[in-house]
Amino acid sequence: MYNILLGGAAGQGVDTTAAILEKLLKRAGYHILTVRDFMSRIRGGHNFMLLRFGPERVYSHDSAVNAIVALNEETYRLHEGELTPGGFILCDSALQIDDPRAIKLDMAQMAKSLVNPRVAGTVAVGAVLKLFGETLDGAENVLPAFIKEQFLEINLKALRAGYDAVEARYPRLGGDTSEDLLISGSKAMALGALAAGLTFYSAYPMSPATPVLESLAEMSKEANIVVEQAEDEIAAINMAIGASFAGARAMTGTSGGGFSLMVEALGLSGMAEIPVVIVNVQRPGPVTGLPTRTEQSDLLFTLSASQGEFPRLVIAPTNPEDAFYQTMRAFDLAEKYQIPVLLLSDQYLGDSSYTVPKPDPRRIAVSKPAKAHEGPEEYLRYRFTESGISPRLLPGFTENLVTADSDEHDERGAITESAEIRNRMMEKRMKKLEGLARELREPEFTGAEDFEALVIGWGSTWGPIREALNLLNARGGKRYAALIFSDVYPLPTKLLTEKAAKAKELVNVEQNFTGQLAKLIRMETGIRMSQSVLKYDGRQISGREIADELSKEGAQ
Amino acid sequence: MSSAYETCETAWCPGCGNFAILECLKAALEKLGREPHQVLLAAGIGQAAKTPQYLSANAFCGLHGRALPAAIAAKIANDNLTVVVDTGDGDSYGEGGNHFLHNIRRNVDIAHFVHDNQVYGLTKGQASPTSDLGFVTGVQPGGSINQPLNPVLMAIAGGAGFVARAFTGRKEQLIDLMVQAIEFKGYALVDILQPCVSFNKVNTFQWYSQRVYDLEDHDPSDRVEAMKRAMEFGDKIPLGVLYRAEKPTYRDRNPALHGEPLAARQPDLGLVDRLLEAHK
């Protein structure tokens, strides 16, 4: 497996250069994981990409790199210590980098000779491909997705110039990922929503959730869907609920700060029993926190957000393939149980690109509202039923009247303060949790069957935990396995109870300060962790970091 | 002819202006020949916001201040619905002020009837965004020190295509303005002056009656003239259509809405396959 760090200032084209490089490597057959580390600014600062690739699936990023592509001196200064023995630094000869490991190319000059200094990044891509034993085959098919037609020719020349300027350093590892996708978590969620029949998305721009909004906006014309930028997050969710009430499949998306504004309406969805899907791409808080970085610290907030009690489902997808299916499932269960469903993503899952198996949009059938009222009795929107689920009609499609009310209401939807009806309505709504419990997906179990230590995680730490298990079990000694939750709340407890009973040690690995999943598990089952690995610096924990942390503790 | 619309017992105080508005709304919908199942009444929270509870149509009684975003989205989802937001001044201009501004910009084809009694009723008598300077309440014991906002002036300045003012003491005119607003293609605001018999002892039925007059010789297509008239709120208060100019609606400008209602659409899985394939 190889690992490249590509860094520069904001505005230097780090993102585009990495996007071209990862796509070319994908075409060459590699599995890839690209992690994007941005600062919250438009120009300057330090941004970098970690692009890890190999013939097998890549589960985690890693800080040890084989190559540093430094578009500025700061990249070199900050990261040269991460270079593995035999690794190289690729940079422009104009940079003040005095290091025997450096391969200096006059990229700026090469770019200028091609009449456009902005192709320097493409020169670097050409050089990197050669250094890792690749060819330029198929580049002409990849570049048009990133480069405007009038600049295509000179970029292909720039690629060739970079390629010809260096000698191969590492052997080609190859692989076959031709049937896989290279996709980010946010893009996968957008596509999953579309597959579920999304027709209405309203959101207010907020990092790191904006890519969901942008992805859907980009598809909106072809998919014939409404994507509306709301005046604030309160409007965004109220719009989604209003659209859903009238029959659109609706979703809204934001990050923690925006979600904080949405919580009253979350209760409206619960009370008025109107399906809605809410994406929260988490970033470190409190408040503005670290806007472009990652954290898993909204779990407990999400479970209890909004006043009062009502059923909800919280799902934390683990990778883009899971994100696609879980988004489809979120729409299905939101409709089936007429509840809000929250998708907890984070910047790591949302912005990173992964190679994953291509999901099948036909695998999940998404429930629909009732088409007509059947039976001789009067149509009652909030009829008391066995399951707690009342027949949801859409206003205007039949002659029956459809109501929604944030006040406590009777079966018709009219305001009531009757104690008896209040009790029955509460029981009706909460009854839906029983059905929901039967729908839950158990966490993924992975690692050694004969484990002694059981690692517990959720959401985007899925990949790093899997890699940590591989490292730990290969090192010998204590045997490790893991349970990684994607359905988080209501908490699926069957596998957890069974595996926890066999474990000598239980370790939660979470990207937050307080160990929120561990608290939830203790609250729901009484099971206590014996150790915690927690990280809250805004940078995702890697497989190696988890493994090192666990080895260290294990030695004590 | 017996009406398809049923009304029921209300929780309003005897003499409340809301009764006249409810009666006129019913009459306007009947006049337009809209069946109850074709109509969606939306509101936030407040005394006025109970209106949808008392008239048999589809109803969306959402959150305080948030009737507009839910209502415009429902209209976007199903253009066949006649969508009327019927709610109070605090709901529309206070808690929901931001949505008021931005839905003027969106110009979704809905009618917005604001029961404007210049006071908070449900919370028992505090200043509303339209309360006069010096208006004394339990929360403003020295009188309101914040100047009132002028919703009709704001709406015209913000680009609303239909802006009218009505008074519950002039029911025929109110029905006519409601009919015009519902028929108008785009966002239509009718600010309805109404007395609050319990909490507003200043702006009473008599107070309004002595000041209101019908707009005559007024060209509602003249925006500057409309703003001049909209600024009149004191000794004289004009009633009628202040401003009227049709412009492209949200639906006109959004090609995604030109087909069947969103509510009737099926996902295009072939397209999803193609979009996924593009990531190979």
Image: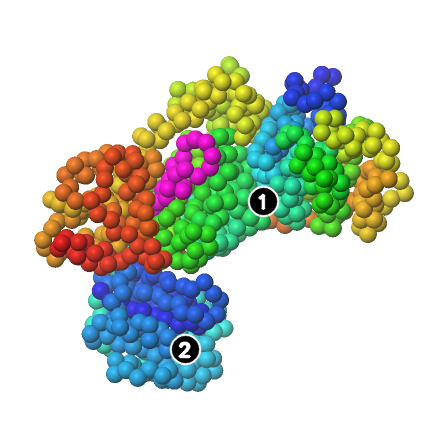
Q: Is residue A542 left or right of residue A120?
A: left
Quick check: A422 above or below A265? Answer: above
- Residue B277 drawn above or below residue B174: below
Is disc 2 surrounded by few (<14), some (14 to 19) or many (20+) residues within 10 Å?
A: many
Q: Is residue B111 visible?
A: no
Callout 1: few (<14), some (14-19), or many (20+) C-alpha neighbours within 10 Å? some
Q: Residue furthest front?
A: B142
In reply to whether residue A239 is colored magenta, the answer given is: no
Quick check: marks 2 and 1 in contact, CB under 8 Å? no
Is residue A317 located in the magenta-colored stretch of the structure? yes
Q: Is residue B63 left or right of residue B148?
A: left
Query: x%, y% of residue B155?
Result: 72, 46
Q: Is residue A272 left or right of residue A170?
A: right
Q: Chain of mark 2?
A: A
**Foreground: A80 or A384?**
A80
Q: Which mark is residue B7?
A: none
Q: Which residue is painted at 48% across and 21% down in the image? A: A422
SS of the residue under disc 1: helix
- Comparing A12 with A177, the one in front is A12
In the drawing, does residue B153 fall left or right of residue B210? Answer: left
Which residue corresponds to mark 2?
Answer: A120
- The image shows residue B55 at horizontal and vertical percentages of 65, 23
x then y, percent, for residue B157: 74, 50
Q: How many marks?
A: 2
Amino acid type of the residue that numbered disc 1 sits on in the rendered structure? Leu
Query: Residue at horizontal 18%, vertical 35%?
Result: A498
Residue B102 percent coordinates (x, y): 63, 48
Q: Which residue is mark 1?
A: B257
Residue A100 is drawn in which quadrant?
A: bottom left
Q: Which residues are magenta?
A: A299-318
Q: Amino acid at mark 2?
A: Ala
Q: Residue at x 55, y 21 (%)?
A: A416
